[in-house]
Image (spheres, helix red, strand yellow):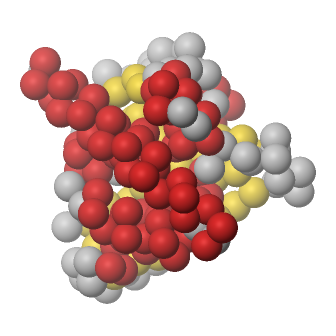
Amino acid sequence: MLEEVLIAGFGGQGVLSTGQLLAYAGMVEGKHVAWIPSYGPEMRGGTANCGITLSDEPISSPLVTEPTTLIVMNRPSLDKFENAVVPGGRILINSSIVKQDVSRDDVLVMKIPANEIAEEIGNARIANNVILGALIKLTGVVTIDSVVESLKVVLPPRRHNLIPANQQALERGAQLAEEYLNKR
């Protein structure tokens, strides 16, 4: 198993923390993991992306240049990274923000209204985990339980009260992916 994920959006959308969660969950499951964050100097509102590689074998390069999965949280990220995804890969789109269609027909595309779902759950800041839940269901790269366990490490102790909402977001995303797969 080798999964190379690129997560991209604006700073403040949880791009880096989503990657961190995925990486920690991989470590919890004993996988080889690499996580490389990249962000503009602005932090909130600036560009942010990260590459995560998870593998059962040692990783030769931590750079994600040809992702098997792309998560895009904003339109500039789709414009910039759409063509980097390998044929047969996946593009998961936060359709709450990105209205543009993917121009390729050789990748699986799933549009997820992550912001609306996060608001329904009660916290707009967990939209990233709605999409992460879908990624988990589509790829099986880690389990939701491992991500929930990783929340205890990634979130500061004062934010541990948000773990149940984050778990609900992950489960909603997985449910959406299940419905998506059943329609195909």
Image quadrant in which the C terminus is located: top left
Left or right of 178? Residue 24 is: right
Which image quadrant for residue 90?
Answer: top left
Q: Foreground residue, 12 or 69?
A: 12
Instruction: Spot the residue most to the front.
Output: 161
Residue that appears at 62% across and 62% down: 159
Which image quadrant for residue 156?
Answer: bottom right
Q: Position of residue 2 (x, y in %)?
A: 27, 66
Q: Foreground residue, 14 or 153?
A: 153
Q: Foreground residue, 62 or 126?
A: 126
Q: Foreground residue, 23 or 75?
A: 23
| In the rendered image, the vertical position of residue 110 relative to residue 168, given as above or below | above
| In the rendered image, the vertical position of residue 27 relative to residue 177, given as above or below | below
Q: Position of residue 179 (x, y in %)?
A: 18, 25
Q: Position of residue 125 (x, y in %)?
A: 62, 41
Q: Position of residue 34 (x, y in %)?
A: 47, 75
Residue that appears at 26% across and 77% down: 29
Image quadrant in which the N terminus is located: bottom left
Residue that appears at 55% across and 70% down: 154
Left or right of 63? Residue 112 is: left
Residue that appears at 27% across and 63% down: 145
The mark total stands at 0
Instruction: Spot the residue most to the right.
Output: 42
Q: Can residue 167 be seen at all in this image of the molecule?
A: yes
Q: Can residue 82 be seen at all in this image of the molecule?
A: no
Left or right of 12? Residue 71 is: left
